Image (tube, rainbow, N blue to C red):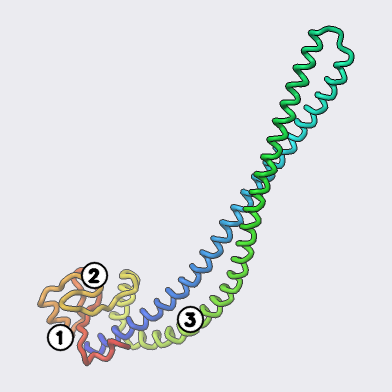
Amino acid sequence: MKEELLKLINLQAIDSEIAGFDHAIANHRTTIANREQSIADKEEAIVALKNRIELLNQKQRETRAEHEDAGARVKDRQNKMMQVQTSREHQALLKEIEDNKKLLKDTEDRILQFIEQIEQLEQEATELENLCAGERQLLAEEVDNVDKEVKRIEGAKKSVASRRDKEAATLEASHLKRYSMLLVKRDGLAVVAINESVCQGCYMTLPPQRVIEVRRADKLNLCPTCQRILYYPEEEDSADGA
Ligand SMILES: [Zn+2]
């Protein structure tokens, strides 16, 4: 049984190593995905800015038309002034001229405000576009690096995985089955040491009798709480660092 347990400890070490490779690959992929998201967010913000700019341009065009109409009305009423007969008509025309002059001033102010707002938004959009371009370039470089790194990790993983298959094949079928089930159900950790009577998988304290049995190792001992396969890490236990 001792030998079988050593094989299980060894297999766990290999599987943890493989999980480490997978974790490293996933981290690289997340880094890239985050960078892509950051660019996508900025692109979305640029589109929103451009929509606002377009809306302001539209308002500006409308206001300009309003401005020109007011100007035309001022001229028209001024011409009519020559032909008025009564003072009442004269007063009415004067009022219209005054109103339209106010409108001229008001629309002019609004046009200036639109121009100012548009300029500011265009500046923001340009800044974001520059940031985006920089980030896209960095991303392209990073994707290249990550592709290379992932390839390297996958190569290392492949060689460890083939070693794993050989090791696994030497185990008793029932042990391998239990181990494989635990590996899936217990988050990649099927075989754990005990330390000061505590299971290093679930950190529950074992009854003294169980600790003695684990130390004796003449059968497969499981943690009563998490069901993981337990071993006692003895100093001469070379499989510990395998
Ligand atoms: Zn446990």
Q: Is residue 51 left or right of residue 209?
A: right
Q: Earlier in the sequence, mark 1 or mark 2?
A: 2
- The residue indicated by pointer 1 is 216
Residue in view at x 75 percent, y 38 percent: 61
Residue in view at x 78 percent, y 17 percent: 94
Label 1 beta carbon less than 8 Å to ligand 1: no
Q: Earlier in the sequence, mark 2 or mark 3?
A: 3
Amino acid type, label 1: Arg
Q: Residues within 10 Å of mark 2 (few under 14, many from 20)?
A: some
Residue in view at x 51 percent, y 78 percent: 150
- The residue indicated by pointer 3 is 153
Q: Is residue 122 left or right of residue 94?
A: left
Q: Which one is nearer the viewer's eye here, 88 or 115? A: 88
Amino acid type, label 2: Cys
Q: Residue lying farthest left? A: 209
Can you say whether 88 is above or below 96 in the image? above
- The residue indicated by pointer 2 is 202
User: Can you give x and y, in whole percent of width and height, for residue 21 in the image?
Assistant: 43, 78
Q: CA distance from mark 2 to mark 3?
A: 30 Å
Residue 143 sits in quarter: bottom right
User: Can you give x and y, in whole percent of width and height, for residue 236 in the image?
Assistant: 22, 92
Can you say whether 54 is above or below 42 in the image? above
For the C terminus, give its image quadrant: bottom left
User: Can you give x and y, in whole percent of width and height, for residue 165 in the image?
Assistant: 40, 85
Q: Secondary structure at mark 2?
A: loop
Amino acid type, label 3: Ile
